[in-house]
Amino acid sequence: MSISTRSVLKISRSAYSSNGKLGIGFCQKRFIRVLTCEEHESITDIENVKKRRFVALWGNGDYGRLGLGSLESKWRPAFVSAFGDGSLREIACGGAHTLFLTDTGNVYAAGLNDCGQLGVEDGRSYTIDPVEVSGLPKDIIKISAGYYHSSAITENGELYMWGKNSSGQLGLGRKASKVTPVPSKVDFLNGVPIKMAALGSDHSIAVTDKGEVLSWGGGESGRLGHGHKSSLLGFLSSTSEYTPRLIKELEGVKIKSVAAGMLHSACIDENGSVYLFGEKTVQKLASRAESTVSTPSKMGELPYSVEVACGAHHTCVITSGGELYTWGSNENGCLGTGDTHAVHVPERVQGPFMRHSVSKVSCGWKHTAAISDGNVYTWGWGGAMGTFFEAEHSSGGQLGLGDDVDYVEPTMVNFGESVKALQVSCGFNHTGAVLEYN
């Protein structure tokens, strides 16, 4: 598939302070890159996209994870011309790969393929252009990307998974290969329609059409919600689950959405209550007094909630009133609270979200993105001193704000005029959005 990359390089209004001068983010930069004449000529407003719906990605470009036909990183959103016909429905950003779902139910992938996470048959190690995932049915309606694995759900609720399987995160059974490079149907779920799946670093969690929750994969830190198991001699046995297992503590509770982070998981029930399980940092947030967090703990500090997202060590929740609450580790300002202090009780994110409600949220490793009033806002780790750095290049840019520094408050990403964001997804250190041009 031929790609002609079209980058949006306009200076974001959010980079400026109220007096029209460059804001603190730019003042903190180690350098400011000056555009050449050739680059100025290549600047293209997204308003020029002919079709109403389109996708933009930005951040680390290693292994081609942005799907732009190159390995170049982007500090501002770049239009993915492979889907310039406006047919894209959803994207999912993973560790170093990205999945694309079209209106026709086809799935495409770009980026790193060291563990088969792209789902292609030819064994390539990576791809810089989106390629169609092999062997999937043509009626896919949902996709999800973990750090090294991927999933897709058909219209009738069948779950397909592919990629790394070292901890059983694909749910294909104990005898399955440690790497599954092409999509495989999770046969253990035959007759159990899946409504939604969320993939973490090496675990998976899903909710059925009846609101039951299953989890599988690596169970370290209690992130599967099944509780600890001990052998006859009193030693802790393996915490991995190689096939989907019902979370018994949530039996009788109808769950409507789930989320998976690196070492923790979360879900929301039909009454708007949030349940958490996983790494120890969440135990202070649970309503129960016990020290264990290996089974779901209901939180009592939040209003009626409708959406939850998990990062590496932080969690975000959107309430029915469009308020955004965050808590957990606050490295690089990923909570959006204006500082970098850890938060042990859900705290409402203010700034622009006091004026306009939040409709969507997504968490990366240490950065966060949200949609409010049709605009995308990002904050947290900008990528400075990340996995790759040299003069005038950086591993970062995942905030899409034109630099690689950290932002501790939500800052608007500029896509041009009359553009409405429909969906946003954060990967490890890249971000993407499905947008609509009015």
Image: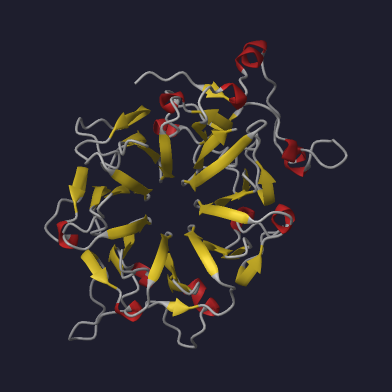
Extreme residue toward the right, this view: 19
Position of 319 relative to 64 (above/below)? below
Tell me which residue sits at (70%, 35%) in the image: 30
Extreme residue toward the front, this view: 438
- What is the quadrant of the C terminus in the image? top right
Position of 288 relative to 419 (above/below)? below
Left or right for 89, reference 321: left
Q: Position of residue 201 (x, y in %)?
A: 37, 55
- Residue 390 seen from this side: no
Q: Position of residue 364 (x, y in %)?
A: 50, 51
Tell me the quarter of the picture where residue 31 sits.
top right
Left or right for 265, reference 232: right
Position of 235 relative to 217 (above/below)? below
Extreme residue toward the left, this view: 175
Position of 238 relative to 287 (above/below)? above
Left or right for 121, reference 395: left
Tell me which residue sits at (59%, 77%) in the image: 301
